[in-house]
Amino acid sequence: MSYDPANIFARILRGELPAHVVEDTEHTLTFMDIMPKANGHALVIPKEDARNIYEVSDDALHKLITQVKRVAKASQRAFPGNGIRVIQLNGSEAGQSVFHLHFHVIPSADGMNFGFHGDVAADEASLAEHAERLKQALIELD
Ligand code: DGP
């Protein structure tokens, strides 16, 4: 199987689908997960076409993981009192459902259900508010 340019994240990258974007850099895009596992659940993706960690170039991966670290630090600021889970899945067998490489950055509190993915779509207002909190925290990091 090869990279499918019609996948949802590719369409978000091309601006064909909306997203609550937190940060758009030369090589990455950070936006809110539409089915959040917790408040502030963000996704960080490379602009390079890659289905998974095996396919991505080392250069794109270095830039991506640097951005993941930055978003994790911002998330800690924006959602204090939580640990931050960073999760990345490769292949449907591992639970991957969108086949454009992505890292999940999820604020996580004690006692949470640690199963993957939320099962209820978030409302637009809370996604927008959480995106704002992360954006502000990224500014504060600079
Ligand atoms: P994974 O299972 O690791 O492939 O996670 C894919 C995530 O993508 C899942 O948590 C839900 C999220 N998601 C699916 N469709 C959309 C979408 O159209 N927009 C956004 N923002 N997130 C989506």
Image (tube, rainbow, N blue to C red):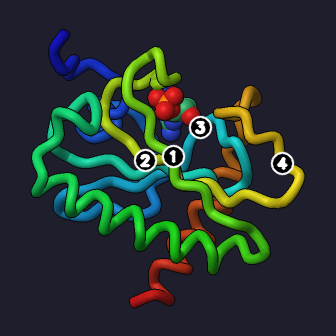
Q: Quadrant of the C terminus?
A: bottom left
Does 61 appear above or below 117?
below
Choose the circle earlier in sequence order: 2 or 1. Answer: 1
Q: Quadrant of the N terminus?
A: top left
Residue 10: x %, y % from top left: 27, 32
| Label 4 packing within 10 angstroms: few (<14), some (14-19), many (20+) | few
Identified by mark 3, the residue type is Ile
Choose the circle earlier in sequence order: 3 or 2. Answer: 3
Asked which secondary structure carries label 4, the reply is: loop
Measure the C-alpha gap from mark 3 to mark 2: 14 Å
Residue carrying label 4: 112
CB under 8 Å between discs 1 and 4: no
Choose the circle earlier in sequence order: 1 or 4. Answer: 1
Asked if residue 73 lies left or right of residue 102, the reply is: right
Identified by mark 2, the residue type is Phe
In the image shown, does 127 or 140 lie closer to the viewer? Answer: 140
Tell me the residue at 40%/62% (across/down): 68
Measure the C-alpha gap from mark 1 to mark 4: 15 Å
Residue 57: x %, y % from top left: 11, 46
Measure the C-alpha gap from mark 2 to mark 4: 19 Å
Residue carrying label 2: 103
Residue carrying label 1: 87
